[in-house]
Amino acid sequence: MPEPPRLAGIGDEAAPGLPDQIAAVRALGWNLLEVRTLDGVPVAAMAEADFARAAERIRAAGLEVVAVAAKIGDWSRPATGDFAVDLAELDVLARRCPVLGTRLVRIMSYPSGGLAEPEWGRLVRTRVRALVHRAEDAGLVLVHENCAGWAGEDADRVLDLIAHVDSPALRVLFDTGNGVAHGYDAAAMLRPLVEYVAHVHVKDAVDAPGGGTAYVLPGQGRAGVAGCLRILADHGYRGALSIEPHLHLRPHLRGTGTDPGRGDPAAFAEYGRALEGTVHRVWRTEAVR
């Protein structure tokens, strides 16, 4: 049977504080943690002493950090915003990622901020290329998520961005659930991108009354999680699968006047067990083909 991917979790989906994040991953029997915020503070914004203590606690727990989910280019930073903020965040992460033992940094490709094409696309290409050059110098790999931004919903734009930058320091972070919220078929977007995928977020969703999105256990929604995993398995994907349940936490709602919620260890554990079952079925099927 082909070796299935290792499983991870975005810690703040389980709990705000690091001790509970570590406990939630450990309760699943996993040893991979993806770090986004600790007590609501992004990794790059933490005070030096707080970061040093957190890194030591992660090491002492025997966990590996698989990726850092940065705010670079995300829904809160439009293309019309100050690029120096993103450069400064990357400079901090260039120092902190080696301490955490990871090379992967999640980025997005900037909401338009009111810019129209082609100016929006031109600006994104320029910014991402500059970010990737800095990442190369630091030994990091920026993984672009199919979420907010110019290339967030369009595989052709992702391929355009990759071709323009032309560097192994830019790869794809594919999120299985974002298509439901953003109005595209996840599997159809994944197929032309699969060779560039270096990291995966697993979530699932359904349409909610009133035009919103409700998040559910993997396999219970319409994101086609199992189908996406089969595409990855067929391609021999060897990166990690990192759960991002969104059952009790919606980080993109921070600062909008709507309560983003907070992580939930029990829901995190249930989500992890559901993913384990799906992964076993998909990779077992792959083995008997």
Image: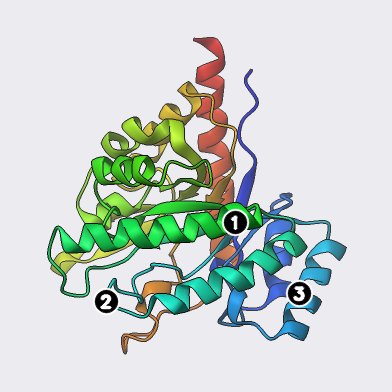
- Name the amino acid, label 3: Ala
Q: In this rendering, which labeled residue sits more in front, label 1 or label 3?
A: 3
Q: Residue furthest right?
A: 60
Q: Position of residue 73 (x, y in %)?
A: 39, 67
The answer to whether residue 147 is left or right of residue 58 is: left
Q: Residue furthest bottom?
A: 257
Say which mark, if any, is on residue 80.
2
Q: Is residue 127 above or below residue 104?
A: below
Front-lying residue, 59 or 247: 59
Say which mark, if any, is on residue 46.
none
Does dot 1 land on a helix, a strand or a loop?
strand
- Name the amino acid, label 2: Thr
Q: Position of residue 232 (x, y in %)?
A: 46, 30
The answer to whether any part of residue 222 appears in the image is: yes
Q: Badge 3 is on which residue?
A: 54
- Name the amino acid, label 1: Gly
Q: Position of residue 82 (x, y in %)?
A: 37, 80
Q: Badge 1 is on which residue?
A: 9
Q: Quadrant of residue 138?
A: bottom right
Q: In this rendering, which labeled residue sits more in front, label 2 or label 3?
A: 2
User: Where's the N terminus, which quadrant?
Assistant: top right
**For the residues marked 1 and 3, what is the alpha-carbon distance in whole angstroms?**
17 Å
Mark nearer the N terminus (2 vs 3):
3
Mark 1: few, some, or many residues within 10 Å (few <14, many ≥20)?
Answer: many
**For the residues marked 2 and 1, what is the alpha-carbon distance in whole angstroms?**
32 Å
**For the residues marked 2 and 3, what is the alpha-carbon distance in whole angstroms?**
33 Å
Front-lying residue, 130 or 58: 130
